[in-house]
Amino acid sequence: MSQNLASIGIWRIVLVAFGLTISSEWAVGSEEPPALNPFAPVQTERDDAVPGYIEMSDGQVLVGNIYMTRDKRLKVYDESTKRQREIPLRAVKQIECKVLKEWMEKEWRFKELALDEKYYTGREYPSRECEYTITLQDDRQITGPLAELFYIQPYTQKPDEARAYRPEVKPEKYLVHKRQKGEPGTTLEALVYVKSIKLGEEALEEGKKKAKTYRPSRTSQTESEK
C-alpha cells in the first residue's frame, strides 16, 4: 500500500513539472513584440535604392538614395542596334543628357466654335529635345531617347545625429524625358532639366562636394518664389 502511494506521489511530481515546462514555453512563444520607440531613427530607405546624386542644368546638386518605381527598368531605344534595351538601375553608372536642340515655340489655340482654325496668342513657350547616354558599370554606353521618372531620398542626417529623432523626409521626383516643354511666357533658362545622374559610392562623395559649392542664381531664386 505504501509503495502504491509513493508511486502516485512520484507521478504527480512528474506531471506538475511537465505542466510547468509546457506553460513556460507557451508564455515564451506568446510574448508580445517590443513597443515601438517614437524617437528611433525613421527607416525610409528603399532596399533597391542606389546612392548617388542628380545634377540639374542650373547647377543644383541633389545627393541621396536614387530609385525608380519598384521592379522598373530603364527603357532606352539603342540607336546603334535599332532595338529597345531594358536596364536595371543597379547596372548603371551614369546617365548624361545631351541637348539636341532648343527653341521658343509660339503658342497657338483653336478659336471658339472652330475645330480647324487656330490663332496666335502672342506668347511663346520654351521647348527642348534631348538624347541620353547611359554608361553601365562595365563602361559600355547606350545612347538614345529616354522617358523615365526617378526618385531621390535626400540625405539630411549628419554623422553625429545617427540616433537623433528626425521627421520623415519625402522623396523628390525628377522626370527625364526626350521632349521638354515649359509654361507660356517663361524662358529656356527657366526650363530646368536633369543634366546628369551619377550612381555609386564614389559618385555619392563627389555629389556631396559639388552640393557644397552650389549657389542658386537670381533666376532660379525668382522662379522658386513664384
Image (cartoon, rainbow, N blue to C red):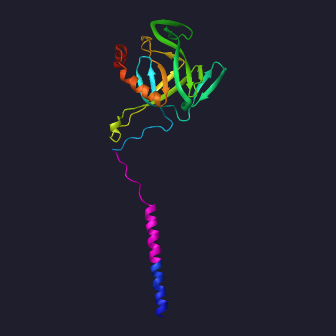
Q: Which residue: 53% across, 27% down? A: 93
- Whole-percent x and y of residue 69? 52, 33
The C terminus: image quadrant: top left
Residue farthest bottom in this picture: 1
- Whole-percent x and y of residue 62? 42, 26
Q: Which residues are magenta?
A: 15-38
Q: Which residue: 47% across, 78% down? A: 14
Quarter of the view holding residue 192: top left
Quarter of the view holding residue 143: top right
Residue 58 in the image: above or below residue 15 = above
For residue 93, side relative to residue 58 (left or right): right
For residue 89, side relative to residue 188 (left or right): right
Is 60 colored magenta in this rendering?
no
Quarter of the view holding residue 38: top left
- Whole-percent x and y of residue 104? 48, 8
- Secondary structure predominantly adopted by residues drawn in magenta: helix
Q: Which residue: 41% across, 18% down? A: 59
Q: Which one is in front, 121 or 187?
A: 187
Q: Which one is in front, 118 or 213?
A: 213
